[in-house]
Amino acid sequence: MTALPIDSSRLAPPMLALVGNPNCGKTALFNLLTGSHQKVANYAGVTVERKEGWLRTPAGRRLAVLDLPGTYSLAPNSPDEQVTCDVLAGRLPGERRPDLVLAVVDATQLARQLRLVLGLQRLGLPLVVVLNMTDLARARGVDIDVEALSRALGVPVVSTVAVRGGGADALFSLLDAALPSAPPAASAGSVTDDYRQVKDILTTLGLDRVPAHAFTDRADRVLLHPLVGPLLLFALLFLIFQAVFAWAEAPMGWIESATALLGDAVGRVLPDGLLRSLLADGLIAGLGGVLVFLPQIVILFFFILVLEESGYLPRAAFLLDRLMGGVGLSGRAFIPLLSSFACAIPGIMATRTIQNPRDRWVTIMIAPLMTCSARLPVYALLIGAFIPARRVAGGLELQGLVLFALYLAGIVSAVWVAWLLKRLGSKDRQHTLLMELPDYHWPSLRNLAIGLWQRVLIFLQRVGGIILALTVLLWFLASFPGAPADFAGAPIEYSFAGRLGHFLLPLFEPIGFNWQIAVALVPGMAAREVAVSALGTVYALSATADDTAQALAPLIVAGWSLPTALSLLAWYVFAPQCLSTLATVRRETGGWSAPLLMAGYLFALAYAASFVTYRIALACCP
Amino acid sequence: MTLPENEMRLSDAETGAPMVVTGLDDSTGLPDLQMRLRELGFMEGEPVCVLRRGQPGGEPLAVRIGASTFALRRIEAACVRVAAGHVA
């Protein structure tokens, strides 16, 4: 037998780094170069996304490609830009210094972007300028002489169209040639000198007058119109909101049925006992609890990606900046907050687009106040059971009105909390915006597909693990110790969870909760909607049955007073007990202070709201 | 700080009026802002124009510089000194 074949190309292949301004089509180029060979993670110690992939050149060389965060200059202004600068300087721990820098330049924005190229030239790394979006430039009458530009800059220049298949062929063949030699490293130049040099180059090449994008100007006249703009934005948000809830309903139903089927199948195969309970009630139910949000998350991220790719997202931030700035938030906070209506976890993950750390922190803090879809089953149960289905003034459905009021209560309290945090924060700090409004363009299908796939994967990896672990833990708490045969009540009452519920009862009695609710709140910590099936368990119903809520409704109507039900509704507007959210906050903020503060303030708000609701309801309808 | 007679702050410029950057100030207490604005192209002699203003309150401003558009809050636009006119 001969020695194992070793693919020498797998041993640390040369590393290319993509560097460029935000919105220069860098990620599209990365997608075109690496296709599906991508890995998304974080840079060590910071919540900046790290995208690495690999490609094979026509001659068969394997090259690693790093998609560095977009930057306007090599004088960093945000954590993202800091990472780019540190990697390029070779001083980020755990990161190799790239062997070749591909400076991606938007051909329609030459002046600004070539200034970054001059900075990159001084790094002392081999450099190739990738002139991207040359098709768009040509459409605007800008024909760039690549040879002449290469001579003027003194580095190789290739032209690409990253959104078109085969658009990077010239770059691929260039990568097979020997690496260009590294220019001598030099200290940072002055902004003014770079500006003059680029201006001279562009004047010589006849490229100093690039017309603005006519379509963007026309579109902005409507989309950023003081009156029409916000109306269109509102309509768009409404559409997204509708889609997230309406379109996702069917696939969510399938996932629920599949989970139930699988649970039943396991139940039939395995004998009654601990293993069956762990698999069916713990693992499968837990996995189902994660997967059931997938349709909503896919739809939500699809819209966010389309908005991001097309260039509309910064416009939305522009329109909302004043409104959100009033309570100390940035206009950019609106997407994370919108996402939080599906689930706070992708919302909190989306706060990475907010550069100002304090704005980001405040946004994370209020994200759980956006009513997430996990609260809907609880709302649906209580409203269905306690709010009469009749029409009130103007033919409005009373039940729908109550649901709307619950959503509104969350939003209003979020505004209030943000305002309070702003008042408590330092007043001398200025909030800046300084955000590019890039030209509009059609999102490419490939970029959408890759982006969507990556986000789904991140959600499943980061969230799935946590929820699964917690579900199993709570299954343990709700199952042990097992009740003796002569125990009169539901077995869960005898378990750790049940004892915890009884122990907590004195705390919850003043807000009208009975011990059944207190017990159900404990497993409800894994995911809020679990509270419904937990109530089912407490009332000795089968927890896995799909019709738990239907069977439960008459029981709680008989057992609870209206003030108790209203109090529980108010509790769930704030409902701090979502451990997955808190775990995500810890991950994203890198410490325990934010999640602890969040849990504390949400608990206080929930308790206060329930107390007031219960007392008022008692006084009004004893 | 008083400005020369023919100059004004970009934040006070009329919407749609062609202006030229005449300089940058650091009056906001934002140390890096001036540098960042320069890097984005707000350099002496560059044509600049406030394309539109957000509502309510005329904030933020959409500003055209070179072939790019940036959204700036009033306080950021106030760092840029401008004078009326087209460049030759």
Image: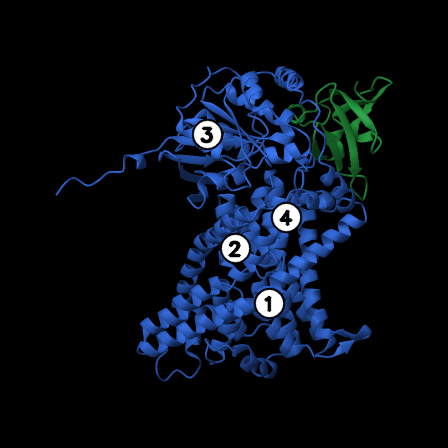
Chain colours: A blue, B green
Q: Earlier in the sequence, mark 2 or mark 3?
A: 3
Binning the other alpha carbons within 10 Å of mark 2 as few (below 14), some (14 to 19) or many (20 upward) gives many
Q: How far apart are the alpha carbons under marks 3 and 1?
A: 45 Å
Q: Name the residue: 72% across, 70% down.
A: A401
Q: How far apart are the alpha carbons under marks 2 and 3?
A: 31 Å
Evaluate if marks 3 and 4 touch, with contact meaning CB atoms under 8 Å apart: no
Chain letter belonging to callout 4: A
Chain letter belonging to callout 1: A
Q: Name the residue: 57% across, 19% down.
A: A148
Evaluate if marks 2 and 4 touch, with contact meaning CB atoms under 8 Å apart: no
Q: Earlier in the sequence, mark 3 or mark 1?
A: 3
Evaluate whether residue A564 shows in this view. no
Residue A444 spot, x, y in % from top left: 57, 46
Q: Earlier in the sequence, mark 1 or mark 2?
A: 1
**Relative horizontal placement of residue A126, taking residue B52 as reference (left or right):** left
Marks 3, 1 in one chain: yes
Q: How far apart are the alpha carbons under marks 3 and 4?
A: 29 Å
Q: Earlier in the sequence, mark 3 or mark 4?
A: 3
Q: Name the residue: 49% across, 44% down.
A: A591
Q: How far apart are the alpha carbons under marks 2 and 4?
A: 25 Å
Using the image, tell me which numbered label, if any, was put on residue A581.
Answer: 2
Residue A557 spot, x, y in % from top left: 61, 81
Q: Amino acid at mark 3?
A: Val
Q: Which residue is mark 3?
A: A87
